Every structure is written in structure tokens, then in C-alpha cells.
Image: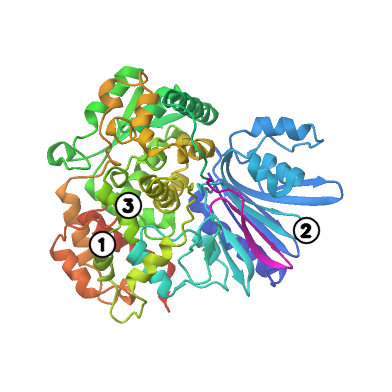
Amino acid sequence: MAGIAGIVNYRKTAAEAADICQNMLEGLKVRGKDVTGTYISEEVCLVHTAYKAARDGKQPTRAFFGQKAYVIVFDGEIYNREELRTELAKLDHRFQDDSDAAVALHGYIAWGAACLDKFVGMFAFAVWDSEKLFMARDRLGLRPLFYSVGRAGLVIGSNLKAVLAHPDIHPIINANGVQEILLLGPGKTPGSGLFKDVYEIMPGHFAIYSAMGFSQTRYWQLKARPHRESFNETLDNIRTLLKNAVKMQTGGDVVTLLSGGLDSSLMAAMSGARRSFSLDYIGNDRHFVATEFQPESDGNYITQMVRHLGLSHKEVVLGSDELADALEAATAARGYPGMADVDASLLLFLQKVGETASVALSGEGADEIFGGYPWFQDENKLALIDKTTFPWAQSIEYRASFISPEIQLSPPEEFIKTCFGKTPVDILYDDSPTEARTRKMFMLCLSWFLQTLSARNDAMSAAAGVTVRVPFLDHRLVEYLYNVPWELKNHKDREKGLLREALKGALPEAVLWRKKSPFPKTHNPAYLSLVRDKLAATPYDAPIFQFVSRKSLGRLLKEDSGVNWYGQLMAHPQTMAYFLQINAWMKEYSVKVE
């Protein structure tokens, strides 16, 4: 894991630029603080920070080719780097080291923006060539890159704290930012930086900043194509694509994050990893209550997988008090309000994993591409997209009730409708109505829901110093699954039925056909009491009340509305914790509402 940042055309003295760069480095240290580097010229300052275990190499990395000098700051991993090194060596490129950063730099020198079509991995990087800054994110946006263009020139950073380290960029949110936080949060519009005049490079895009200004271009998008393979051919293709993705992302002492569910169990089985880690909470053995979304606890299935694979396994058990106390640290890691204790628990979990491992495999992404969420299965839930309502945040009226009456906003329904319009969906002329809606749900999940989960995964793993890889999100598998018809994905009328059938024999039958269960969360009533007490202690003049209604927050403290804030993971305790995160974030950044 690493952090990158920089300024171009900074219009400051050399001393001022050096101070800004140092402040940016400080802002990035939540992503790694062991190895830092700075490049400063008359026009650009680029900085990089990482953990010792990162494979990004010492950066910024420089190269000279022909009569031109280049410098890169890179965050991420390129899984096909050895193949690319061989190809580039034939073009007379010589590498300073064996890092991913060097491959990305020479790839850009050789092929320009077309290098992105060759890279397989998760990354965000910026290259300066003495005339322009070229910036890019991976196809699915698994690594972040924020920016601001204005009087300060161009400012970029892996996180918001690094961008806000520039003295000309201020922690101001306007009406749009309020709507992002209360109507969409913890999700956000792709490309939004929440703060005024701060944005994020879009997934699958590159951007260029030069004397001509700033431009952003899409280099990757999902295209609808006819699926002509038989059922058995489809199974074979899925096995091949997934096995290749896992093989490419498995190397060294990789561990697996094991929940006992289908996706993480497949990662454990296919990777050949010998060690695994699972997460539980004090009191869950006594307080677990089965629901429609989580009919069973994880323990029995984890035990089956450990025995089946002969794993060396460690269970991490968290207490309610440490979970509540970690809400602020999780907010600091993400840089804005997140998924409450869902973020905090992952941070604490990965910190424990990081004591003995630096790379882990996760099953994240399978639900998005194989249609595992309940809103894919239920026709009534699927129909919600026709009403321009996000199925994981249906309660627009409830959410809007938390907006202070002093804040003047456009109608919430109009804001959500505008958000829907920002999601491109490519369909075939002969797609059935169900197929067209399923494609739209696929894109909504990929563009919105997955971005929330990916930002969580990136931020918490970066703060813990653990690289978490997600083989299900190999772009070639994603491209293929986009065009597999729903009737095949929904094999046996089961969520992810196609994936289960494709990997039959790899897992015990009970695990293979287990009903989908969400990320483990605490069921201990002690946690509910802790977050309620913390929220009740919020001072009258707390920053949160700049745009949050005191009356609605008081009602939240008194009663459970029964409305989930964000999918099945954020019920009443997590909703209160989310508002605690909002207040902690506003206090940390001295946020002002315009």
C-alpha cells in the first residue's frame, strides 16, 4: 500500500512548495509512513509514501528515454508486470528496479495512454514528462486519486487529507456535499470529492493537465455483446477466468480472509494459501438473531473450511468497546464518513492480520458480478431501479428528514434522479425487459455500491499496512459476466447459482450451497448502548449541527425506525455510528458548510 500526491503549476516559491509537499506527506502517512520520497522542480512537486513491505519501490521513480525525462508516483499493483517487462525490454527499455512503478512508467513512455489497456491490476498513478501530468486509475477504481484544479494549479492526492494540505484548498461543503453525505452516504457519486472544488478521477479514466488545461477521458467501459456459449461452455470460461485471476494475484505468503461464505471459501480453496483469518465479536454466540439476510452464523462453516483445506487458522474476536472506539480511526483512514462499524471492524481485523501477514485475498466483488445481492433475485426489488431508487438506500424521505431545515436544497428525489442519470448502461436491442434491468442493476452495483466497498477495502487495508487483493474483480472476468444472461447466472434459482455450479467439487456441499451472508457484524446490545451514549453526549455546538437536524438526531436516539440506512449492514446501531463519524470528520477537518 502507498500514498501519492502532488502539485503542478503551484505558483509558490521553492520554500513554500517544499512546505506544502511536507504537509502532503503528513496527510498521506495513514497509507504508509516507513518510506517517503519527494521530487520538486520549478513546475511540479510529487510525493510518495509507503510501508516497507510495499512492492511499489522507492519513489518518485525517474527515467530518461530519448531526449526526455519522466517521473512517476505510483500506488498499487500490476499483476502482469513480468510479462510487460519482457515486452518492454524488447523495445530497449531498461529498468531501475523490479517495481510495479518502473513497469508503469516505462509502459507509459512506450505506449502513452494505451498502456492502460495492457495493465492488469489495481492502481492509481501520475507521470510528469516536463510538459504535462498524466494521471490514471484502474478500470474498477480499486485505488483512489483525488484532485482539485483552480487558483492553486493542479493538486492531486490518494486521500482528501493530502489534497486539503494545500493552503488554497479549503474544507468547505456546499449543498451538493450535504446531499452526498445524507442522501447517498456512506456512498458517494463517482467522481465526487465531497468538498467544494475537490473531485476524484473516475474509475477507468485517465486525465491530463497541461498548459491547455485539465481533461479527463474514459479508456474502459463495459460493452453489451451477445452471449453465444452454451451453459457448459460458460462454466468452463468462468473456471478459466477465475483460476487465472487467482493465480495471477497469489504469490508469496498470501493469506485468506475467511468468513465461511461461498466467495471467501473459494478464494481459500483456489489460492492454495495455507493460512486464514476470520472475524467474530464478543457476545455474538449469545446474541445472534437469524434474519432474512443472515439466517445462520459463520462459525460452523469456517470450521468446515479449515478442516477441509487443512488451514492454519486464527480467529480475531473484537469487543464492543474497541469497536466503538475505532469509529474515529476508521473515519480518519477513509477521509470521510464511512460504513460505521463495518469500516471500524475491518480496520481492527486487518491490523491483527498485519501482525503476521502483508497480503490477503478477499472474495469481494462476486456479488456484484454474479448477482448475489437480494435486489437481483427479487423482481419487486429489481423494479426499484425503474423508480430511480437505489435498492440499498430506499428511504429517501427518512434520510432527508435528517437535513437541518436551515439548509436550502433541491428536492431529494431530483438529486437521486440526477445521480441515476450518471450511470451509463450498454444494452442489446433484443435484450428482454428483465435482462435490460439486470444489466442496469449490474452497472449500478459496480458504479455505486462496489465503490463504497472498494473505498472501505482500500482505506482500511492501507491504514493497517495490508494489501487486500480481490480476484473476482479482474476486469476480464467482469467483462465476461456482464454479458452472461441472467437465466444462466440464476442457475437453480439461487443467488450466484452459476458460480456455485462452476466450482462444484472445490468446496464442501454445505458451504457451496450456503445462502449468502453479509460481512460479519456485532449483535451485542452493548454496542448499541455504547454508540447511543456517545451520540447522546454530542455537544449542542458540535459541528455536525451545521447541517444535521437536532430533532431528527434526537428521534434516532429514542427509537429504532426499522429503516436500514445502507443495505442490510447498516441498521439502527450503525446509523447512529454513522452520525458519530460525520461529527468526527467535521471536527477533524474543521469542515464548514457553505
- Pick the residue in front: 433 or 179: 433
Task: Write down the residue under mark 3.
Answer: 326
How busy is the neighbourhood of tag 2: few (under 14 within 10 Å), some, or many (20 plus)?
some
Q: Nearer the viewer, mark 2 or mark 3?
A: 2
Disc 1 residue type (three-letter): Ser
SS assignment at label 1: loop
Disc 3 residue type (three-letter): Ala
Disc 2 residue type (three-letter): Ser
Q: Earlier in the sequence, mark 1 or mark 3?
A: 3
Mark drawn on residue 395: 1
Name the residue at 35% across, 27% down.
500
Q: How many marks?
A: 3
Quadrant location of the C terminus?
bottom left
Left/right placement of residue 582 relative to residue 431 reads left
- Pick the residue in front: 12 or 191: 191
Magenta-highlighted residues: 203-223
- Pick the residue in front: 587 or 216: 216
Left/right placement of residue 547 relative to residue 460 reads left
SS assignment at label 3: loop
Task: Write down the residue under mark 2.
Answer: 130
Alpha carbon separation for disc pair 2 and 1: 50 Å
